[in-house]
Image (cartoon, rainbow, N blue to C red):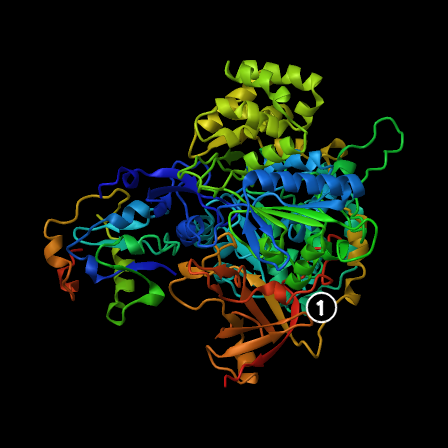
Amino acid sequence: MSNAETDTWKKTACMICALNCGLEIKTEEGRITKIKGDKSHPTSQGYICEKSQRMDFYQNGADRIDSPKRRRPDGSYESIDWDTAIREIAEKFAAIKSKHGGESILYYGGGSQGNHLGGTYADSTIKALGIQYRSNALAQEKTGEAWVQGKMMGAPVHGDFEHCEVAVFLGKNPWQSHGFARTRVALREIENDPNRAMIVIDPRRTETAKMADYHLAVKPGTDAWCLTALSAILVQEGLIASNWLAEHTTGYEAVAAAMKEIDIARYAATCGVDESLLRSAARRIASAKSVSMIEDLGVQMNLHSTLNSYLNRLVWLLTGNYGKAGANNAFVPFLNLSNSNRSTAKPQQNGKPTALRKWTHSPVTQSKVIMGLIPCNVIPDEILTEHPKRFRAMFIESANPVHSLADSQRMRESLRALECSVVIDVAMTETARQADYVLPASSQFEKAEATFFNLEFPRNGFQLRHPHFKPRPGTLPEAEIHARLLEAMGALNSANYTFLRGAARLGYTAFGLAFAWKSMRDKNVARYAPVVLYRTLGPSLPPDLAPAASLWGISQLFVRVQPAAARGAGFGGPPLFGGNRLFDAILKSPSGMIFAVSQYADSWNAVKLPEHKINVNIKEMLEELATIDGKLPPHRADYPFILSAGERRPDTSNTSIRNPEWMKKGDFGVLRIHPQDAAQLGCNEGDWIELRTPRGKAQAPIEITDELQPGHVSLPNGHGLDYQRADGTVSRRGVSLNELTNTADRDPFAGTPWHKYVPVHLERVVHA
Amino acid sequence: MTHVVTESCIRCKYTDCVEVCPVDCFIEGPNFLTIDPELCIDCAVCIPECPVNAIYAEEDFPSDQKHMTAVNAELYQLPGWKVITKRKDALPDAELWKERTGKLSELNR
């Protein structure tokens, strides 16, 4: 091949899941032609899975957009120039802000998988518009867990599956959904080591469950009974780490009292797991030198999800599995994505009552704000109402709520009910098709890009990905879009920039000193720091890396907030210099680099409760536990099957990969069903079934498998996109799950949806 | 669950596959490559690399190659068979052998 472009391997990363494994790619005439794992990547070390091969289906999707678009009254879109789009959006949002306040504007999203760098600039737009409420997909997954974490320790944790003696997977099939570095390799190592063990709590016999030593195949929706039984066995059999609990935790007495009351045999029967199997699993956990446990959507999008997050933590805390090798530890994030935990983290020192925090609950439904996010499931209720505090506008960035949030139909209605809506995205998504304005972003391979899902411990890595294609004409990186919006709103202008631009030419030290000086005197420089950095430091950075400018500010913050971890990674010393060296290392490490090296003892410093002790007694959760026997999973005669909506399979990607053509073999989007159920419905393999819920219906071919329990069926995640091909035709492959789901089916604490427990009616489709 | 190298590789040994393997599970013998089934993670990245289409997922086997699962599983543990991670030249008469079938008798352990 003569093309020089083809012969060079270039560093980037996969954008399918939150691991973002390092990749090396070859490109040719605008296409990604070859992909392999990057052995120099600090955390993935060359590891990839088959899903990494799909990058070009994203890069060259036929429905990418290359001009700002404005909706016409008939629902079609016209292309407009950037100046017009920015001016009109700035005017309309400013008018809504002045009439109803910034709290009437909801910011949703902030980055798709692997696409987090642009979101750092959204902070400036959010402040300029006075936006007080945000939401994103974390608020339908992780907010219950975050709330529990805040109450128990005030620090997010991550397991060490490379070194643990026992791994526990709760509502998670890591073989498919990954979740920790080099996942399949780590799973194979545990499976093949007779001294280690794997415990899987999952109603389905997943790929991971087949590798497990203990598969606790709970009945759908009964995880809480299984987890309670495990803790009750630990307490009742005297298997707890008593000394460790006394030294490191508070509140154990209340937990012990609750667990002593539990009738283990009855809880085993309720969750459908043999009592002796539960007891052996609990004993295996108690006897292990180290246990790591991870929960995921199987429980987080299920009945009792917040309670499950609490019960999960009890299992490993009762056995002393925190703050040591092979156990859960408090990883050090580069950028903290959660604004939660403030109330528990910082008790008032002076005895005065804490000032009431504002914006702690959503304006209409009064739902709890966790991690700074309102629950995804209440968004339509916050819009489709006459309530005076309803949301009037939405700013949606690199997210597709119409497809990915419960009840797509109501989400579409909600978007159309707003006075103004803007979507930033690379493609004409289902959400974009409801927006008043659509702004085309450059792809993740056309601009500097990064992920902030950096969860490893004790060595945590970060990768700034360099662009490998010129931006598609008409598209802009998010940094530029936000900068133009701020300038159009009059929040920033050249008077804020000139001095700093001059300083930037003299190097990071001069820039750092100038930035400190200027931001003390110019409140807009401090307030809109990300965009100011982009406009001032950005032009002095290597070509194409201007959107990395916000990382200078994040580097400076990081070395101040996490001095020990920064020092461990070689970024100690006076903060300005440590921060500058960190930023410089980021720019010069295309495969990624280690930004934090922690000690296990640091996990204790991360516990933000008095004396760094973990609180194992969350009163609300123990009260909830006392009532769960009255909250058994509901069974409806008219919707007798339970659909697990959103299974991760080889044939799922994420919705950034809109073109389904990557699926070259096998069956796409099948409904998995137990042989007994298929027989009862009169169905053979491949027959089509209609699913019906109170909210909608859909059809899918079936795959008969005894991996599922009778009465339990599953459909894959992320299918059913309306993909517009180059010839203009729109095709939909697979089921768009949220046409079936209901926003009211959600966790009472965190508002997270019950997508893994969707009662459905099934019927064989008789084709004419 | 593993991927398997079929007879097409025998006396060719192109080694394009080893460059892309994320877990270094290719094992090299005198005139054949095999896959360590304990290490393979079914990522399938190697499949399109092979110029003679020798690599298959277990469930996609051509019907006349089913025996190769056992052959792979036997060979990878043999003394002298070593992990290979860097591509090298194919065997000198690879071109002659690439179209042939039924090559199992040619396999050198």
> Residue A682 or A347: which is nearer the viewer?
A682
Q: State which quarter of the image contains the N terminus of chain A.
A: top left
Q: Image quarter for residue A673?
A: bottom right
Residue closest to the eye, A586 or A303: A586
Q: Can the viewer see residue A687?
A: yes
Q: Residues within 10 Å of mark 1 (few under 14, many from 20)?
A: some
Give coordinates of residue A103: x percent, y percent. 77, 42
Local SS, label 1? loop
Classify residue A449 as left or right of residue A26: right
- In percent of the image, x 81 and y 32: which residue is there? A347
Image coordinates for residue A64, horizontal then vertical, percent = 48, 50
Residue at point 64%, 61% (across, down): A408
Does residue A468 sit above or below A404 in this rendering?
Answer: above
Amino acid type of the residue that numbered disc 1 sits on in the rendered structure: Pro
Furthest residue toward right: A352
What residue is pinned by disc 1? A633
